[in-house]
Image (spheres, grey):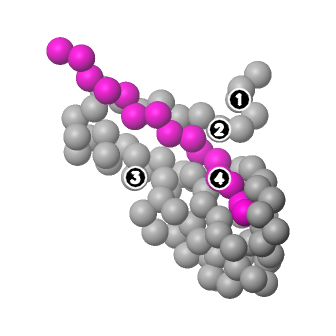
Amino acid sequence: MRKLILGAPLYGYGWEQNGKMNVITEKQFYKMFKRSEYHHKNGVTKLIKPQKHGYTYLSIGDSKTEKEFLSLVRKFKLKGLAIWRLGFEK
């Protein structure tokens, strides 16, 4: 019997109001924003006041997201989880 492996990135994208997209690592994200400036729920992080930072929306995979992915692996009895982060592609 074959089983699926869930593949998930651990980085995010920030979209500026002008439509430009930037890749943001977890480390960069937490340096850029204070905890009071974002809301994290179900693996998605949104800025509370995006206009203040020039972003309309921001989503980032982080260590909390990794735990949520692992719970999906257990729930659906998948073979495993494959994750990758920026900087490990070389």
| Disc 1 residue type (three-letter) | Phe
Q: Which residue is mark 3?
A: 68
Residue with the mark numbered 2: 85
Q: Main secondary structure of the magenta part?
A: strand
Asked whether the beta carbons under mark 1 and mark 2 sit within 8 Å of each other, the answer is yes
Indicate the quadrant where residue 78 lies.
top left
Instruction: Give how far across and how far down residue 45 sits, in percent.
Output: 57, 66
Q: Mark 3 is on which residue type? A: Glu
* CA distance separating discs 3 and 2: 16 Å
Whether residue 49 sits left or right of residue 72 in the image: it is right
In the image, what residue type sits under mark 2?
Arg
The residue sitting at 65% across, 52% down in the picture is 12
Q: Which residue is mark 4?
A: 12
Label 1 environment density (alpha carbons within 10 Å; few <14, some 14–19, many ≥20): few
**Disc 4 versus disc 2: distance between alpha carbons?**
10 Å
For marks 3 and 2, the one nearer the N-term is: 3
Residue 28, visible in the rendered structure: no
Q: Is residue 5 visible?
A: yes
Instruction: Estimate the x, y position of residue 53 in percent, counting from the top left.
Output: 79, 77
Q: Compared to 49, does 73 lie above or below?
A: above
